[in-house]
Image (cartoon, rainbow, N blue to C red):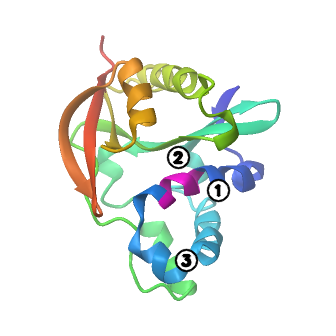
Amino acid sequence: MFRNAKAEDADQILPILFQIFDEMELDVFKKVGDEKMAQFIKEGFFQPGYRYGLDNILVNEIDDKVVAIMVGYPEEAEDTIDEPLKKIMHKYGIKEDNLFGDKEAWPGEWYLDSFAVAPEFQGKGIGTATMEHFIEVIRERGEKILSLNVDVDNAPARHVYDKTGFKQVGQLYIGSHLYDHMQYDLTK
């Protein structure tokens, strides 16, 4: 079942999301440690308007288990999407004002910030099925362009995006990693 995330999903969403954070090798995670980062990211789930707030997370659930997550927002929200987290970060003694300093979305896009499948469900077609359903949900919202970034070294994810019809339109660095910027034309 594809649905909006709920508060009771938080403990299942967190480890799926952390797969992405681990791949990104963010400096703040190295400095602070995963345990403290998990505490404040989880607290952020309950902040309206935050990048990883529950209002920006959709889940795919099978037999009461969250098997995949999608986190996204319109590009025009990108400049302020992390504002709700600043107070939480400072409360935990983290001096940085945000986790991400790089611009990830292009003007006019609806940006899929994070997409991940729980490890025990990878390689079973769940990623592709989830992405296909997600594309329809965003299309039904009236969006025109769906975008995402995929690490150039992440062949399994790239396979899902190619298979579901995304096209590479550029490249950019997020942190120290090179990403392919991909778009899906929702008007077709």
- Identify the image quadrant of residue 5: top right
Viewer-side residue, 18 vs 132: 18
- Depth check, mark 3 against mark 1: the one in front is 1
Tell me the residue at 48%/84% (across/down): 94
Q: Which mark is residue 56?
A: 2
* Residue 148 x %, y %: 35, 39
The part of the chain drawn in magenta is 17-22
Query: Relative to 180, is 140 on the left or the right?
Result: right
The answer to whether one can see residue 25 in this image is yes
Does dot 3 land on a helix, a strand or a loop? helix
* Residue 158 x %, y %: 38, 32
* Residue 22 x %, y %: 50, 60
Does dot 2 land on a helix, a strand or a loop? helix
Q: Mark 1 points at which residue?
A: 14
Amino acid marked by disc 2: Asn
- Real-space Cα distance between discs 2 and 1? 14 Å
Instruction: Quadrant for the N terminus, please.
Output: top right
Q: Earlier in the sequence, mark 2 or mark 1?
A: 1
Q: Is residue 21 magenta?
A: yes
Viewer-side residue, 49 vs 17: 17
Viewer-side residue, 176 vs 74: 176
Q: Is residue 2 magenta?
A: no
Q: Mark 3 points at which residue?
A: 88
- Real-space Cα distance between discs 2 and 3? 18 Å
Amino acid marked by disc 3: Ile
Q: Earlier in the sequence, mark 3 or mark 1?
A: 1
- Real-space Cα distance between discs 3 and 1? 17 Å
